[in-house]
Image (cartoon, rainbow, N blue to C red):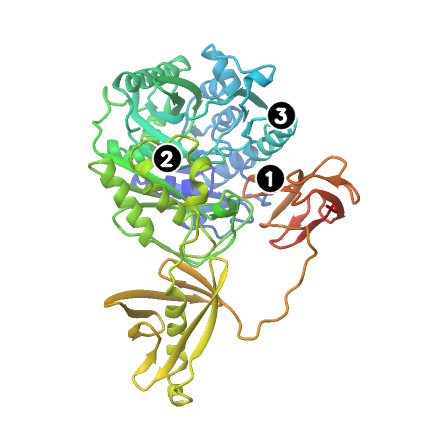
Amino acid sequence: MITSVLVANRGEIACRVVRTCRELGIRTVAVHSDADANALHTRVADTAVRLPGSAPADTYLRGDLIVKAALAAGADAVHPGYGFLSENAGFARAVQDAGLVWIGPPPEAIEAMASKTRAKELLGIEPLREVTEADLPVLVKAAAGGGGRGMRVVRHLADLDAELAAARAEAASAFGDGEVFVEPYLEGGRHVEVQVLADTHGTVWALGTRDCSLQRRHQKVIEEAPAPGLPAALDDEVRALAVRAARAVGYAGAGTVEFLVAGDRAHFLEMNTRLQVEHPVTEAVFGVDLVAGQIRVAEGHALAEDPPPARGHAVEARLYAEDPARDWAPQTGRLHRLAVPDAVRLDTGYADGDDIGVHYDPMLAKVVAHAPTRAEAIRKLAAALDRAVIHGPVTNRDLLVRSLRHPEFTAARMDTGFYDRHLPGLTEPAPDQHAPLAAALADAHGRSRFGGWRNVPSQPQTKRYLMAGEEHEARYRHGGQGLEADGVRVAHADAHLVILDVDGVERRFEVSRYGDRVYVNTTALTALPRFPDPTAQHAPGSLLAPMPGTVVRVADGLTAGTPVKAGEPLLWLEAMKMQHKITAPVTGTLSELHAVPGQQVEPGMLLAVVKESAP
């Protein structure tokens, strides 16, 4: 009987495992890097052990340190969560060799499936050994790990070597294994997967299907269960293949078998020998707790002969601290507030007041809705996200709401190219034009308590805000009856709530302020000073860091004086476990290069300057 579990992970999944352990009466131990010293997962666990350092390679990827932590804290089992060491057979063996219970599949099963190349060979599928023009497009993929890291689509043969190098570097950073392989890339396919749960007594459950086709950078954004619109024969086929794959390697615990579905055919992608980020949609549909199932299997309990029946539909959206309109650039800073309606499930690794740093994945939370039908689940999730209070760094919330309401998604006609086709429209700014006025009125309420409206009451007051990248001016007056504005009637105004009568309809605006940052309902604004200070000017062609991160690579041979072409990759930044290319904005000559590998950069820092060639 397991009494104490060390969770060898961080963030949302660590909190998720702790929650189930608490319900089962199991004590929990967290591990944390220095960057995570005050993270939520360390606060909700019963105790915590420090892993010195901040980089994943020095902390969460150090299996030896984690085993020592488990022994020191008196844990008798280890749950790996997902990512990091969750699919590392060597770590699983080290846990067992230390006399601890491994809450995961047998190391031999992990070994058989952890390398995507070996998994394909096991099923008789060969990766591409040599790539020709006829093979394009192809997908470069990390042999270990997942989550979109170390993955690149190559459409031009000339780009293959550079993308192989970038994929190797990203895979080595994320998983400690730089092996990559190449396979055909199927355009217009759907990403469909099957959740399995197996015990050590020969029972394997196939807990339905999931569709995870909405992806950015090959990382899932919106997932649902069951996968909509699959022909019955294809649904039976993928579930049977998933069970066969699990039995082939003597699987035990929770795992996922993934397919790319094109037309009426299912192409095997890989088996993930761990819990998936999107497991809550399966839990909602089948009424199970997969983490509890993992623990019971690890304790030797047998599953029932048949899984529980499925009911209804569930949809999950991943809320990221990122800006989809700026090439999905990750965002950092203080998360002042995060709250969603009680009608949906929120899995998160952050609480109000926590800081979002540069070292790890930018996912803030998963929001999950369950309802009797797909349409109802989508409507519930979209509405919950639309009403969510998210005060802090820029997020993909608006993108999620628009994606859920897009006709291609609501009609279940989506595929993995959804964002390639629709991203510009989904990220078009649509700020509330009354938000600056509401912000100004709320601010003015706090400043008018001494009867300031009597001073030159006929003259309008102005306040400027930056909203969706554009400057807006709000005009109002302190009148005899209180605050007044042109074109609308001010029904109510205080420091936190403004009600405006717009064409006979009263609209409520909840206002929160954190320094110069103002949130009016879901619209974010920045209050601009009345007399702005001169800002630093940069030369034309300047390349500024779009995000905080680390310079991991500079293009070979790149020095001041090197000729470059517009769009040519010059250097790569790594932030939140993803690599981002910085390209030449124009064709010309590199006149300045300030970035060097290993350098830590902040947003707006000058990296290089390209002087445009004369026409």
- Where residue 389 sits: x, y (%)? 36, 56
Counting residues from the start of the chain, the first of labels 2 and 3 encountered is 3
Q: Where residue 361 appears, x then y in whole percent?
A: 50, 42
Picture quarter with the N terminus: top left
Identify the residue shown where x is 45% and y is 63%.
Answer: 525
Closer to the camera in the image, 69 or 392: 392
Q: Which residue is mark 3?
A: 160
Q: Residue 506, located in which quarter of the rendered image?
A: bottom left
Mark seen at residue 27: none
Above or below, 276 relative to 263: below
Residue at disc 2, secondary structure: loop
Q: Secondary structure at mark 3?
A: helix
Marks 3 and 1 in Cβ contact (< 8 Å): no
Q: How many C-alpha atoms fall within 10 Å of the one at disc 3: few (<14), some, or many (≥20)?
A: some
Amino acid type assigned to the residue bearing label 1 in the image? Asp
- In the image, 66 versus 606, the foreground residue is 606
User: N-terminal of the two: label 3 or label 1?
Assistant: 1
The residue sitting at 25% across, 36% down in the picture is: 374
- Which circle's residue, 2 or 1, is located before the other in the chain? 1
What residue does disc 2 label?
278
| Residue 586 point in image, percent of width and height | 67, 44
Q: Which mark is residue 58?
A: 1
**Residue placed at 31% from the left, 38% from the top?**
407
Give the image location of residue 9, x and y in percent. Answer: 47, 39
Assign the C terminus to one quadrant of the image: top right
Given the image, on which type of amino acid does mark 3 rest?
Answer: Leu
Image height of 505 relative to 65, above or below: below
Can residue 340 be seen?
Answer: yes
Residue at the outermost top position: 124
Separation of residues labelled 2 and 3 (CA atoms) = 31 Å
* Helix, strand or loop under label 1: helix
Judged by depth in the image, the label closer to the viewer, 2 or 1, is: 2
